[in-house]
Amino acid sequence: GAVVSQHPSWVICKSGTSVKIECRSLDFQATTMFWYRQFPKQSLMLMATSNEGSKATYEQGVEKDKFLINHASLTLSTLTVTSAHPEDSSFYICSARGHISTDTQYFGPGTRLTVL
Amino acid sequence: GENVEQHPSTLSVQEGDSAVIKCTYSDSASNYFPWYKQELGKRPQLIIDIRSNVGEKKDQRIAVTLNKTAKHFSLHITETQPEDSAVYFCAADNAGNMLTFGGGTRLMVKP
């Protein structure tokens, strides 16, 4: 149980394009989803928290107009990196938390984004 | 906000030895402390967690201890095996149940 999927697993795009990443909870309803960014050999840095049906809460220093988050249902959240630039290249990982275990987060497999 | 410090950043042990990773946190209101194992290029996997009403928790070769007064918690792995080699992250929750992660420990188990 508690499986989270993420799509795509990796993407290469040109500078200036937008990239959408999907995060799905497959066997539970995720009341809250989190988006993290992880640079090589570094820790996970929380970008934003999203609750189903409401606006995401962004961490300090994360541009909400650049990283658009939508959490339209209890099983799906999307992160769109708009006008991506090489410095946005990173490993983006989502996690989901359900209403049964309200503190445990289950992570998706991550999306490796490379912006040329 | 919460601040989590993790030590050491790298740890090399011989197969069969024990490994200990320590974390400290700053927010006394934190009450949930998970540990994640992340292999290269893969997702973090929850390996054990502890809540503030418990001082120690064990699951086979893995144990976690928590000292709320001192605001530190530790991961103990006994009888290490090469497949234990990975990066381990501690984390602590904060207001809103968001997790703040430590910087990670790269554990290398030499056969």
Image (cartoon, coloured by chain):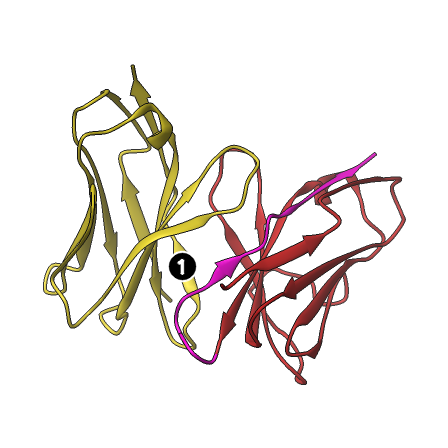
Chain colours: A red, B yellow
Q: Depth check: give the residue in front, B71 or A113.
A: A113
Which residue: 69% across, 79% down? A73
Residue A7: x percent and y percent? Answer: 73, 53
Residue A109: x percent and y percent? Answer: 60, 48
Q: Quadrant of residue A65?
A: bottom right
Q: Is residue A75 above or below residue A14?
A: below
Check disc 1: other Cα within 10 Å, few if <14, some if 14-19, many if 20+.
Answer: many
Residue B72: x percent and y percent? Answer: 18, 55
Tag 1: amino acid: Thr
Residue B103: x percent and y percent? Answer: 39, 43
Q: Quadrant of the C terminus of chain A?
A: top right
**Which region of the structure is painted magenta?**
A99-116
Q: Depth check: give the residue in front, A52 or A99.
A: A99
Q: Is residue A46 above or below residue B86?
A: below
- Report the residue that reaches farthest toward the top: B111
Q: Secondary structure at mark 1?
A: strand
Q: Provide the residue designation for mark 1.
A: B100
Along the horizontal axis of the image, is A99 left or right of B2? right
Which residue: 87% across, 42% down? A15
Which residue: 58% across, 69% down? A27
Q: Depth check: give the residue in front, B28 or B60.
A: B60
Q: Depth check: give the residue in front, B29 or A4.
A: A4
Residue A106 is a magenta residue: yes
Which residue: 49% across, 39% down? A42
